[in-house]
Amino acid sequence: MLDTLTPTLDTSLPAYDEPAVVRAAAAGDVAAYEQLYRRHAPRLFAVVWRLCGGQRARAEDALQEAFLQAWKALPAFRMDSSIATWLHRLAVNAALMELRARSNQAHDSLDDADLDLPQMHVHDRCAGTERDLERVLATLPPRARAVLVLHDIEGWKHSEIAEQLQMAVGSSKAQLHRARGLLRARLGDMT
Amino acid sequence: MNHEDPRMTDPTDHTDDALQQRLRALPRELAPPGDGWARLQAALPPRPPIVAAPPRMLGHGSSARRRLRWALPAGAALAASVALYWVAPMTMQLPSQTPAAPSVLQQQASAMSADYQQAIAALPRVDAPEWRPALRELDDSAHQIHAALAQSPRSRHLLEQLQRTYALRLELTRQAATSTGLPS
């Protein structure tokens, strides 16, 4: 699974006029929508994959759901906004919905649900590598992981995270502190 | 007395930066599933083209203008249907809840409604019969979203849908005003 986490920037993609593509897709042009998908899916898949704890099937479902929602909502998309930011928000929301749906089967919230993530022991091999970091990231409790992914990797502000996760800003900061602590401990304090 | 080095009181401080650097250095893209587009395309609901541009370039009395005057309300009706298509299933699935006080999202919805009312009041009143069904349908959508929010006061999705519906209503009102020769 982790082997697939490689940069996928396709420099062979032809230059294209994104506003025109967005307008065409909003008007129902499936070919234009495919261009949007191919342009933005790799970036969105990385974030939903991390939010879903590295579980590929869930991440794929979240990605598909995000693009389905985007297709339905494109006619109302405001062209003065960034389509990348808009899609990113939809993808994050879809991933969080996916997590909530699964966690609700056994838990009432995302707080401490470790879901069905496998326990990973990474202290004694390949420590300090990017792959280890991804593996340990996937073992964090979903809410703490979401805050860490959105803040430390995606660059969101606490206020934005709090709004998206429907929590107080202070809770977002506390979850980040907790996530970093868990991450350090599980990495064997090798940072 | 405590003579500890201040840095030792919280040994995590100096490791946070290093950890964040490692996190920021993680790949920003990941190859999506190979059949992702094919699966998505198969699941896309049909959506006939929606005419969105107002007929600014056409002269009075031209046949093209007459065609567009009909095409715009048709597109508007379709857009309104899309909004209803989103809201109707949601209202059926929402669990019944009776919150004691308005949630933050409900307060945001109220503020958004107030802003919308101000914006719509600033636009010319549109009485063209061909636009009425679409505009009425969007108004109905907004009412349904408010009702759904009352049932599910923490649903950010509903708030976003309300925002989109208001945006679409404003845009269509502008288009209607333009197509009927009124200033927008």
Image: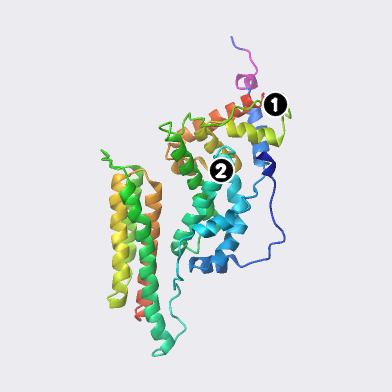
- Residue density around tag 1, few if under 14, some if 14–19, many if 20 or more, within 10 Å: few
Q: Amino acid at mark 2?
A: Ala
Q: Is residue B32 left or right of residue A66?
A: right
Query: With B10 as the anchor, is B95 left or right in this view?
Result: left
Q: Chain of mark 1?
A: A
Q: Is residue A33 above or below residue A145?
A: below
**Closer to the camera, B104 or B164?**
B164
Q: Residue at x 38, y 81 (%)?
A: B69
Instruction: Say which quarter of the image contains residue A180.
Output: top right
* Magenta region, residue range: B3-10
Task: Name the residue: 48% across, 39% down.
Answer: A99
x, y percent for residue B98: 26, 40
Name the secondary structure under disc 1. Answer: loop
Q: Is residue A117 above or below residue A3?
A: above
Please, is residue A166 above or below residue B114 in the view? above
State which tag comes first along the sequence, 1 or 2.
2
Q: Chain ID for label 2?
A: A
Quadrant for the C terminus of chain A in the image: top right
Dot 1 and dot 2 within a common chain: yes
Evaluate whether residue B184 shows in this view: no
For the residue marked with disc 1, what is the amino acid?
A: Met
Which image quadrant is residue A123 in?
Answer: top right
Which element type, helix, strand or loop, lies under badge 2? helix
Task: Say which of B122 and B141 sits in front.
Answer: B141
**Residue B5 position (above or below residue A166):** above
Is-magenta flag for residue B8? yes
Q: Which class describes the residues within 10 Å of circle 2: few (<14), some (14-19), or many (20+)?
A: few
The residue indicated by pointer 2 is A57
Q: In the rendered structure, does residue A56 fall within the stretch colored magenta?
A: no
State how many labels appear: 2
| Circle 1 residue | A190
Disc 1 to disc 2, how far (Cα)? 31 Å
